[in-house]
Every structure is written in structure tokens, then in C-alpha cells.
Image (cartoon, coloured by chain):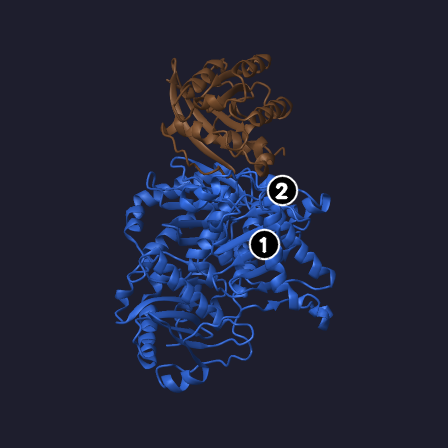
Amino acid sequence: MEDPAEPPLPGPTAVEQSATLEAEPNQNADPETEESEDVDVSAQSADIVPDEANGNNGNNGTDCSGEFVVTMLARSNLEEQAVGTEGTSSPLSEDIAEEAPPLQSHRDEDVMAESWRQHRKHVFVLSEAGKPIYSRYGSEEALSSTMGVMMALVSFVQSGDNMIRSVYSEEHTVVFLQKGPLVLVCVSNSRQSEQQLRAELLYVYYQIISMLTQASIARIFEHKKNYDLRRLLAGSEKILDGLLNLVDWDPSFLLAAVHCLPLPSSLRDSLSQTLQKAITPNLVFSILIAKNQLVTIVQEKTVIEDARLEPADVHLLLNLIGASSAFQAGEIWTPICLPLFNPDCYFYAYISYLDPPECTVCLLLLSTDKEAFYAVAECKRRIEEAMVAQNSLSLIAKAQSYSVSQVGVSDLRHFMYKPFDVPDNHHQLTQFTSPEMEAPYSSDEEKMRLLDLYRYMHSRIHSSSRPLKLIYHVAERETLLAWVTSKFELYTCFSPLVTKACAITAITKLLRWIKKEEDRLFIRYPPKYSTTPNPSKSSRKSEQQDSTDNGFMSLL
Amino acid sequence: MALRELKVCLLGDTGVGKSSIVWRFVEDSFDPNINPTIGASFMTKTVQYQNELHKFLIWDTAGQERFRALAPMYYRGSAAAIIVYDITKEESFQTLKNWVKELRQHGPPNIVVAIAGNKCDLSDAREVSEKDAKDYADSIHAIFVETSAKNAININEVFIEISQRIPVLEAAGATSARGFKLGRQASESRRTCC
């Protein structure tokens, strides 16, 4: 069972690099360093991985399928045109789509238009019976025969006891993911690695699970193989659209880590205490979010002992909040499943903004009791009162993401730093920190270019065939250095003329700065509480003090 | 002045404009690009009716099929239900009839039902005639109005008519008809039935 949401840890070939870089930077770095100035282009190769049970039989479809899928997809479109199934397109719409696509909703896009083909990343979800469930662009009806071809490919390979995983063509990578009765397909020309694309498909799957639960999807399709799941997802397409948009723009998904709002630790602690005091039976998580970033999470004690909240679940929650209408005075009460926590059960989420009409500070309370709305809403009122008394809202409003210039390392343009769990504190939520993207990465185009470079570095570091510890990559307009140790994963971006030695000195400085600021940049001690009376109340305090030395950066 | 809390829930197909109606009533604003509601959204608004203050506890439910099973949680204990359809979508009127049936079978016995034909500003695209809808509403003794959340037509009127139909309080302190929910305590003590 694979789990691509977690980035694969460096494989056994990667030697632990425990010595400090500062001592002998070049010696340590060189054996693991890869200097690359060109991007691999693995064109025209099909990659069908045989099932383990059936080692060598996997060649049936291998040689032809790259061409095959492309021609099949093309043919199916032609057929659609001939039969005229794409009901939405009028003779005029082709021109309109090319002239002014922004005016059209993605749902109404003409799937015959060149602009539809040009999209960077398509995502399709279908049932095992080949029924369309979701398409990122264009209506599912218009794409039904395209999806039929996809299903035909999946079943064709399956009939040889194999599983289709990906198809490469010159411009596109097609990645397949089968999860229970659902088949997810990504067609991308973004040059992302197959693993990355599959991880993204998994997020899509999880988002569907978060709305319906895995158990009920399984039950539905057991009962009726050709059920049209769109009936249940109708009106929720925006949630999936929003997720795919976030996946493209927010590196949290790539890193499988949560980005929290930098805050003075005293403020964060007092906010956590406020949440901790306002509890009610069956409340399990209290989450405070500001400007779409995490401020703090407080968890019920018994819950935290057997499981922790995974970053992916937090991402899904943040996306849900983003995709629901920011009702200023409204309080939302909705069932939601956290797929990594438990794919088969619902929590009941209470969502309310604390600062109408701005709606930037959002409180999310998760209960296991669907009748608990009024009790949970009362918790919110207590939290609100306490926050007013402490003037917390205006303090949160002042908090913002930081600029890379605060680090004080010249030539450093941007970075992403993800510390791994501290061994003594393994219930910690995986987090990362990153400054604002500033010039020259201010335009959307440049932002995406930097994100693509990071994705490229990430794919090299986590390559399944040849994982790396350190990459120094001289790109056209910048120089990047990525480094993975047992303590952290770091991606840095420098101005183009920086030498390797300079970059490594800069990273040492950066790590020192992060160490100094870590109380502000990360949620250090996610607090716990108990909704059932518990005698051992004093244990938490001492725990905190013990772990002070186990900072993220004991390396330095 | 006596304050009465009246729980009101909005039911109906997805996209007919339930949230827009509530938003118009509570905030007096309109957003054409509103996102679909997830689960249900809770809001309150207090209005004066004769010599009483009526505090509407409004449960704006999601019309999507996947939330269907949750509806009883919201109409249970409601004093009134506003069932909304879209006058430009015949299908949404059929869904409305199913909601009426469900309320008959499982809803509170004294619930006041209001039928709102929303989007009456789009009469060019009308699929449900006003007369048919009115006849149906009369046959089930429901309040009937055509509304436009966009142009603020008949929105306040729906709630005023609900206030009129709510039975007057018999005596102070008496636990009023089962159709009322008096605040938080009442809901907490109520047991799960679904």
C-alpha cells in the first residue's frame, strides 16, 4: 500500500549526513552533490509497472501504449465531435473560448477547443464503470467518451494482471491512480514528476472522501456499479476546483506540511489557552486560522494519544473553509471526514469568522457529536469574549508573513524550510516556514516559475530510483540549493551568480536565523486538553519544559 | 417587550437561492457569485412584530443531495420552514413537493410552511407558473410568495407572514407548542432521533 501524500523519505542509499556543514562544507557536500543545469526530458516512454505478484509479464502493453493513449484520446474527441455529444458547445463557442476564456466558467469550457487542450494540468475522476465524476475543465458529460477511453486503458492493462500507472508522451505525462471504486487521472504538461502528480491525485481523492467517507463510497458502488456519483458531489465541484488551485500555488501540498502564521510565542500560547478553556464534551479539535494560515490547534487529550492530525487533513479543512461562502454573521455546521484520521467517519465542523466583516480570522471546532451545535457555538462565544478581553484580534491582524530580507543573508531570494519531527515530540504536526515571495517573484508567472523549480528540486531529492541528499542547481535566472537531512528538508533560492561555497555559508546563516526565530515561526507545543476530568493535570507543564532543548535545530 | 425565539429552516434544491434569501433578510445584501452552502449555516435576526420581538433562528441548509440526511436535525423543532424553489427550474418545484411530503411525515406537527418561488426577476425564463404554485400552496395551507433575493422583492414579507401565522403565546411560562424551540437548553436536552 503506497501513501504518496507523505513525501518518501530518503531511501536506504542516502547516507546520513550528520556532520555539520559549517566544518567542512565542500567535503561533505561534494559526494552527495549533483550539479545539473539541464532538465531531463523523458519523452516517449511508457511506464507500466507490473504487479508484484506478476513480475515479468508486464510487457504486453508497454511498447505501444504511449502512442496508444494519445491517439485514443484524440480519436475519442473526434468521435464526440461527430456524434455531437458535447451539448454545451454552439458553433460560436469555439471562437469565444479562444478569444476570451476568462469569461467562461471552467465547467462550460468547450472541450474541443485548442485552449482546453492547452491547460497545464487536467484532472479527471471516474468510476470503475467508466462514469465521469469530475473534470477540472469542461463538463463531465462532454468528456464522457474521453473518460471511457481512460477506463478502457485501465481495464485493458488490468486484464493482464497489471496496473497502469503512467503514460509519457513528448509533452504530457498521464498518471493514473486507482482508489477503491474510483479512478483518478491526471494529464499534465507541467513537467512534474509522476510521484508528485500521483500525490496530487491522492489529495483529490481525499477531498472526495472528506465529503462522502470511504465507507459510503464503497457501499454505494457495491450496491450499484454504475451509480452516478455526481449526484452526491453536485454543488461541491468548487471545493475540488479550489483544491487543485491550491495544489498548484501553495507549496504546503508539495511538502506535506502546514504553514503557520508567524506570531510571538506569548500571543500564540495565550490563544491556545483561550481555546483550551472553551471546551465541551465531544469536542476534539479547536483550530484557529488567520489569513488562511494556521494560528494554533488544540486537541483533546485522548485523541492525541492514539492519532494525530495529519497535514493533509489540515489542508483539506483549509480548502473547505476557503471554498465555502464567507458568511459574515453565519455559523456553519457541517459533517466532514478527515480521511487520514479516519476515512470512514464524520466529524461535525463548526466554522465561524471572529472578525466580520473582514473575515480573516476563522475558528474551526470539530466535534464528534452531530447534535452539539449549540454547545459548540457557546464555546465560540467564550473564545470570542476572551479574545476581545485580550485584544487578540488586533494583535493577530498585525501579524504577517515575513520578508526574506529579515534573514539578513544577501543573495538569498526565497526558501522553504521543513523541520522533521523531534523524536521526543512525535505528535507534532509537520510544519514548514517560508517567507513571502517577493521580487523578482511577484508576478503570477514568476511565482509559478519558482514553484516549478522547487517542484523539480523536490522530485530530484525524492526520486525513487536515485534519491539525493543535496542538490546545487544552476538555473537560467537563479541558483537553487536543496538539502535533506534527518532533521529537516530545505529548499533555497539564490541570485544566479552565487557560488556553491557562498550558498552553503548562506544556508548556515539561514539555519541559525531559523533556530533563533523558531518560537515565532512554528507551533512548538500543540496544547492538549481533556473534556473528561483527568487527575494528571500537572504533567503537561513539566513536559513542556523538558522539551525546550529538543528544538527543531539541535543540529546546530 | 416579550422576546420570542423562532426557529426557521430553509429547505429546497441546490442553487435555488436559499442563502441569498437569508443574506438579503439578515444583511440586506446580495452576492451573485455566492458559493454553495456546506452543511448548514446558522444566523439570527430579531424583528419587531406587534408588541413582541421575534428573534428568528435561521437554519439555512445546503440543498445538495449529500446533506439530505441531515435535514431532520434542522427542521426538528422548527416553528416554520421556508421551502424554496427556482421559478426557472421545474425540477426544483418537484423537489419542493418532496420536502413538503417529508415535513408532513417527519416534521413537527404545527410547523408553518412557507413556499417561496425565488428568482422572480427572471420571469423570461419562467418554467413554473405562479398560478400552479399558488394552487399547490393553497392545497397544503402554506404561505406562498414569489421572491427575488436579487431585487429584494418579498423577502421581508415572507418572514412577516411567518410571524403572523405563529400561534400567540397562550400564557407566560407555558411551554408552548411543540413547534417551538426556546433557546439552547431546549435543543441540548432533546434526544437524538435520527
Q: Which label number is shown at residue A74?
A: 1
| Residue A153, position as x, y percentages in the image | 66, 57
Q: What colour do you see for chain A?
A: blue
Crowd rating for badge 1 (residues with CA inside 10 Å; few <14, some 14–19, many 20+): few
Q: Nearer the viewer, residue A36 or A92?
A: A92
Could you tell me if the residues under marks 1 and 2 are in contact, i.e. CB atoms within 8 Å? Answer: no
Locate residue A104 relative to residue A370 in the image: left or right.
left
Dot 1: element: helix
- Would you place residue A160 above or below residue B47 in this image? below
Dot 2: element: helix
| Residue B50, position as x, y percentages in the image | 39, 13
Residue at x 39% of width, y 72% of height: A553
Chain identifier of the residue bearing label 2 in the image: A
> Which quarter of the picture shows residue A11?
bottom right
Q: Is residue A344 visible?
A: no
Q: What colour do you see for chain B?
A: brown
- Quadrant where the image shows the C terminus of chain B: top right
Q: Nearer the viewer, residue B29 or A430?
A: B29
Q: How many marks?
A: 2
Residue at x 58% of width, y 55% of height: A185
| Residue A421, position as x, y percentages in the image | 47, 67
Q: Which residue is mark 2?
A: A83
Q: Is residue A223 visible?
A: yes
Amino acid type, mark 1 = Ala
Q: CA distance from mark 1 to mark 2?
A: 15 Å
